[in-house]
Image (cartoon, rainbow, N blue to C red):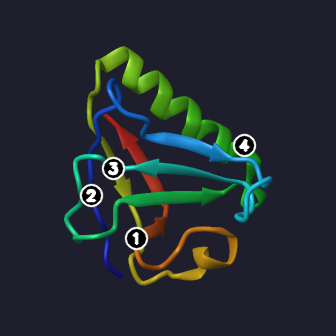
Amino acid sequence: MAWFTSSYRAAQETVAWVITGAEEALPNFTIWCSGGSSVGNIVYFSYEVAKNATVSQLLANVTGNHAIQTNDGPITIYSNLSDLSGVAWGCGTANCRIIDQLAAY
């Protein structure tokens, strides 16, 4: 299992959003890592709302509050890079992986 670490800047760019399902993808919470990643083209990390709506809300709250309180402090995302199952709900395999864990510092 490969794990990934990344950080992002929140103040000047949109870095996290929720897809409601009105688009082509199923509802999900996605983070864009504007600072890049240690695995090249993987810059989006997403969590499917239907899997656990409470977790999706917590991810949104943690990233939003953390960006406000730390003035763009880094977060760390852990993801199993071999898990490509997100393609079924909108996390494409070319540049997106599923959020397994998120840590804010």
x and y percentages locating residue 33 in the rendered image: 33, 50
Judging by the rendered image, the residue that carries numbered circle 2 is 5
- Identify whether 104 is placed above or below 52: above
Which residue corresponds to the image point at 22% horizontal and 70% vertical from the top-left?
A: 40
Please tell me which residue is depicted at 46% across the width and 69% down the height of the picture.
97
Amino acid at dot 3: Cys
- Tell me how far mark 4 sits from mark 1, CA to CA: 25 Å
What residue would you read off at disc 1?
95
- How many numbered discs sit on the rendered protein? 4
**Which residue is the site of mark 3?**
33
Q: Could you tell me which residue is drawn at 61 percent across and 37 percent down?
A: 58
Q: Earlier in the sequence, mark 1 or mark 2?
A: 2
Of circles 3 and 4, the one toward us is: 3
Q: Secondary structure at mark 2?
A: loop
Contact flag, marks 4 and 1 (Cβ < 8 Å) = no
Residue displayed at 59% across by 80% down:
85
Specify the label residue 54 is tagged with: 4
Q: What is the three-letter code of the residue carrying label 1? A: Asn
Q: Spatial distance from mark 1 to mark 2, Cα to Cα?
A: 15 Å
Residue sitting at the far front:
23
Q: Quadrant of the N terminus?
A: bottom left
Single out the mark in the foreground, 4 or 1: 1
Q: Are marks 3 and 1 in contact (CB under 8 Å)?
A: no
**N-terminal-most mark, 3 or 2:** 2
- x and y percent of residue 46 in the render? 53, 58
Q: CA distance from mark 3 to mark 4?
A: 22 Å
Left or right? Give the position of 56 relative to 27: left
* Tag 4: amino acid: Thr
Q: Position of residue 12 (x, y in %)?
A: 32, 26
